[in-house]
Image (cartoon, rainbow, N blue to C red):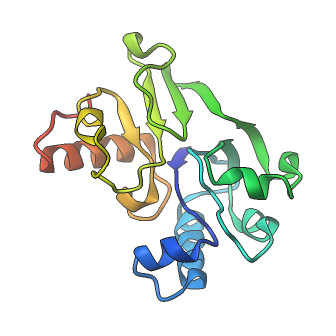
């Protein structure tokens, strides 16, 4: 099975406080438990960036505990910890943009939301992170109008990896609540 996730920010105390966790350790443990409750070792997890950030613990401690075959689309906060880790030990692929196809559906995973992507005009999906649950950026209302663009951030997906079907449903609910068009 395939799962999608973004913006976990393991180790990031400021994000833990914003998310109302009592500590960064509490956030990390909750995210790891939610990840491993859904993901098996044979599952693929596509990470749309910002996996770890400002961590006091070695990155390998997080990576060893997270189940599944990991694919990382590098986020702006990943570059620091990535220099200290032998990436091939933990990831199937690491790139700034990951393109794939499952069951005839093409998708692009990138940390940043994009206006255009490979095969967009032919039904391909864009899966991104970076914006967490923000609507504050001036482009957010426009972003809600882009068909087949989905925010995989944990802040809007119950702090866990989600399937493509769940990602589409969660996006549809958020867009409907905001008065925007459905994502398909």
User: Quadrant location of residue 64?
Assistant: bottom right
| On-image quarter of the C terminus | top left
- Where residue 34 appears, x then y in whole percent? 52, 69
Please tell me which residue is depicted at 86% across the width and 45% down the height of the picture.
88
- Where residue 53 appears, x then y in whole percent? 64, 63
Residue 81, placed above or below residue 108: below
- Where residue 151 appears, x then y in whole percent? 40, 44
Q: Residue furthest front?
A: 138
Q: Residue furthest left?
A: 179
Please tell me which residue is depicted at 29% across the width and 27% down the height of the picture.
146
Q: Horizontally, is 98 left or right of 168 in the view?
A: right
Residue 127, placed above or below residue 173: above
Residue 131, placed above or below residue 184: below
Q: Which of the pair 53/174 is nearer the observer?
A: 53
Q: Which of the pair 141/61 is nearer the observer?
A: 141
Numbered marks: total: 0
Q: Which of the pair 83/183 is nearer the observer?
A: 83
| On-image quarter of the N terminus | top right
Please tell me which residue is depicted at 40% across the width and 80% down the height of the picture.
20
User: Quadrant location of residue 110?
Assistant: top right
- Where residue 120 appears, x then y in whole percent? 42, 16
């Amino acid at each position: 099975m395939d799962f999608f996730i973004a913006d976990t920010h393991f180790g990031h105390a400021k994000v833990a406080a914003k998310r109302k966790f009592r500590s960064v350790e509490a956030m990390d443990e909750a995210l790891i438990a939610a990840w491993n409750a859904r993901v098996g070792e044979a599952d693929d997890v596509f990470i749309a960036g910002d996996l770890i950030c400002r961590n006091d613990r070695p990155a390998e401690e997080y990576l060893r505990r997270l189940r599944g075959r990991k694919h990382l689309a590098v986020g702006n906060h990943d570059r620091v910890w990535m220099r200290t880790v032998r990436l091939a030990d933990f990831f199937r692929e690491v790139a700034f943009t990951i393109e794939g196809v499952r069951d005839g559906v093409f998708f692009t995973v990138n940390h940043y939301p994009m206006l255009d992507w490979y095969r967009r005009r032919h039904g391909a999906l864009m899966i991104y992170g970076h914006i967490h649950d923000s609507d504050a950026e001036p482009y957010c209302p426009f972003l809600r109008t882009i068909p087949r663009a989905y925010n995989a951030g944990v802040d809007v997906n119950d702090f866990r990896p989600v399937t493509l079907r769940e990602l589409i449903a969660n996006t549809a609910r958020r867009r409907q609540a905001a008065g925007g068009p459905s994502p398909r």
